[in-house]
């Protein structure tokens, strides 16, 4: 049976803290075809490499700054202090290229991947260029950095974004799915990579355990039932099914990186809400966005 939940350390491979679904990954063993994720924690001047493969890649500094060589061409990513500090520079690299990612002064970096056939130009998207969306309202307010969506990036297959959910709020809500190719919906695998922190202004002890929660459940006869506690470095794969909410527990902010891709002809995020819960969107029309947003550092 394929595992869909990977606590920090469960998908380690060499220098990579996380290696899932990519061309060189051993996990998951089966049932995963379109998306991948690698995350590495690097000291100053440390480096990781990815060999040329038929996958497009998006390099995302989680904290710290990085130099990325794409077939020898140098790109500098200024990075950020943390994932809760607002957007970072990111780098898109098309298929069939060797990547070397070197840390400038120590930090953590993610690489989103998708199996692809068509090549598109390499591109650095500066932090200031990244569309920042405030989605939802009230305690469903969240902040979305849309650097890898079709409107922001020319790519072959994947859709990538990151979401910040303030303490006590729900995101990825109402529960929704994208597991069929039909009118109004596209079939997309999805990866959630999580980080958490104690929310600003909270008198938490030094050993506080910053947590969040993620729910995934069946939309048809394919079995899936996830109700997971998540912390920094944890990853959940969503092959199909309703997913949401992702909950930031009171006292703790929640971040997640989403990587999506699928087999359809159209690169588009089209979803269906769980009909039991979709009505909640109507309540947002008369509700203000959480004033704690946006997170800018």
Image: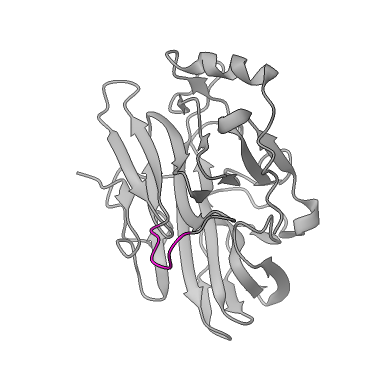
Residue 67, quarter of the rendered image: bottom right
Query: Quadrant location of residue 166?
Result: top right
Tell me, yes or no, whether the highlighted magenta stretch contains residue 208.
Answer: yes
The residue nearer to you, when weighing 288 against 102, is 288
The residue lying at 51 percent from left, 49 percent from top is 254
The one nearer the camera, 123 or 292, is: 292
Q: How many marks?
A: 0
Q: Position of residue 253 (x, y in %)?
A: 52, 50
The answer to whether residue 194 is magenta is no
Residue extending furthest toward the right:
128
- The answer to whether residue 50 shows anywhere in this view is yes
Farthest left residue in view: 1
The one nearer the camera, 63 or 286, is 286
Vertical position of residue 228 compared to residue 172: above or below: below
Residue situated in front as seen by the camera: 173 or 129: 173
* Span highlighted in magenta in the image: 204-209
Answer with the quarter of the image where residue 80 lies: bottom right
């Amino acid at each position: 049976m394929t595992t869909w939940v990977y606590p920090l350390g469960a998908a380690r491979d060499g220098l990579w803290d996380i290696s899932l679904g990519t061309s060189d990954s051993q996990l998951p063993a089966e049932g995963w075809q379109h998306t991948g994720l690698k995350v590495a924690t690097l000291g100053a001047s440390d480096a990781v490499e990815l060999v040329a493969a038929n996958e497009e890649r998006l390099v995302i500094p989680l904290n710290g700054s990085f130099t990325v060589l794409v077939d020898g061409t140098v790109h500098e990513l200024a990075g950020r202090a943390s994932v809760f500090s607002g957007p970072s520079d990111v780098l898109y690299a098309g298929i069939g290229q060797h990547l070397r990612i070197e840390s400038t002064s120590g930090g953590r970096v993610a690489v989103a991947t998708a199996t692809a056939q068509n090549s598109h130009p390499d591109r650095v998207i500066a932090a200031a260029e990244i569309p920042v969306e405030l989605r939802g309202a009230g305690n469903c307010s969240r902040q979305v950095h849309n650097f890898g969506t079709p409107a922001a990036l020319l790519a072959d297959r994947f859709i990538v974004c990151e979401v910040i959910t303030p303490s006590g709020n729900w995101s990825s809500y109402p529960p929704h799915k994208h597991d069929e190719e039909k009118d109004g919906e596209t079939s997309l695998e999805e990866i959630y990579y999580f980080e958490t922190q104690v929310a600003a202004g909270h008198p938490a002890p030094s050993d506080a355990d910053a947590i969040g929660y993620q729910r995934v459940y069946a939309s048809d006869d394919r079995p899936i039932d996830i109700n997971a506690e998540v912390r920094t470095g944890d990853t959940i794969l969503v092959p199909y099914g309703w997913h949401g909410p992702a909950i930031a527990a009171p006292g703790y902010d929640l971040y997640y990186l989403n990587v999506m891709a699928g087999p359809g002809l159209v690169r588009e995020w089209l979803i269906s809400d769980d009909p039991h819960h979709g009505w909640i969107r109507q309540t947002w029309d008369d509700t203000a966005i959480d004033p704690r947003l946006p997170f800018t550092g």
